[in-house]
Image (tube, rainbow, N blue to C red):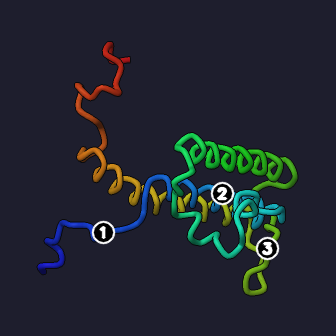
Amino acid sequence: MDQLRARAVPTSELTVGGLLKHLAVCEDDIFCWRMSGRPPVTSLTVPEEDVERWQFTVDPHESAEQVYALWEAAVARSRARLRELLHDGGLDQPGQLEFDGERPSIRRHLHDMIEEYGRHTGHMDLLREAIDGRVGEDPPADWPMLPSDGN
């Protein structure tokens, strides 16, 4: 019962930037590689032996702009691939990679991507709370990021 009452999240190396980089890798893995059979662009820019470390770490030479741009570029590629796939046969056509003798459908891969974001949204929320101390879904009305006129 004491475990149910525990509040603290153990110390972790996970960061917001690391999650964004990981999601960029996932976007390319699922949309480029698994669905389309194309090289996963993001992970190809990193030495193969460093992909696991790199995708969860923001190195000192990387800026926030670079990390966001990396993720945004991966999302743009994913959207383009999905448009192509929808045009060329829809969600129920098989993807390009075989797993255990089966080729999962584009629909299945899309569900996997949604699940990936769902899992990491919870992680991101814990990280954000640790950064700004805010809990809940909406910031207070006096939070400086909101427009003063309420629009």
Task: Choose mark 1 or mark 3, whichever is in front.
Answer: 1
Task: Choose mark 1 or mark 2, whichever is in front.
Answer: 1
Residue type at the position of mark 2:
Glu
Q: Which residue is mark 3?
A: 97
- Which of the numbered marks, if any, corresponds to residue 11? 1
- Numbered disc 1: secondary structure: loop
In the rendered picture of this protein, how many numbered marks are placed on residues? 3
Label 1 to label 3: alpha-carbon separation: 37 Å
Residue depicted at 79% across the width and 50% down the height: 86
Q: Say left or right for 27 vs 97.
A: left
Q: Is residue 134 above or below residue 13?
A: above
Residue depicted at 74% across the width and 67% down the height: 105
Q: Nearer the viewer, residue 24 or 1?
A: 24
- Numbered disc 2: secondary structure: helix
Position of the C terminus by quadrant: top left
Q: Position of residue 103 (x, y in %)?
A: 78, 75
Residue depicted at 29% across the width and 50% down the height: 129
Residue type at the position of mark 1:
Thr
Tell me where residue 48 sits by quadrant: bottom right
Q: Which residue is mark 2?
A: 27
Q: Is residue 108 above or below residue 67?
A: below
Q: Position of residue 4 (x, y in %)?
A: 17, 74
**Residue 110 seen from this side:** yes
**Residue 92 seen from this side:** no
Q: Say left or right for 66 vs 44.
A: left
Label 1 to label 2: alpha-carbon separation: 27 Å
Which of the two discs, 1 and 2, labels the residue nearer the N terminus? 1
Asked if the residues shown at circle 3 and circle 2 are in contact, with their CB atoms under 8 angstroms apart, the answer is: no
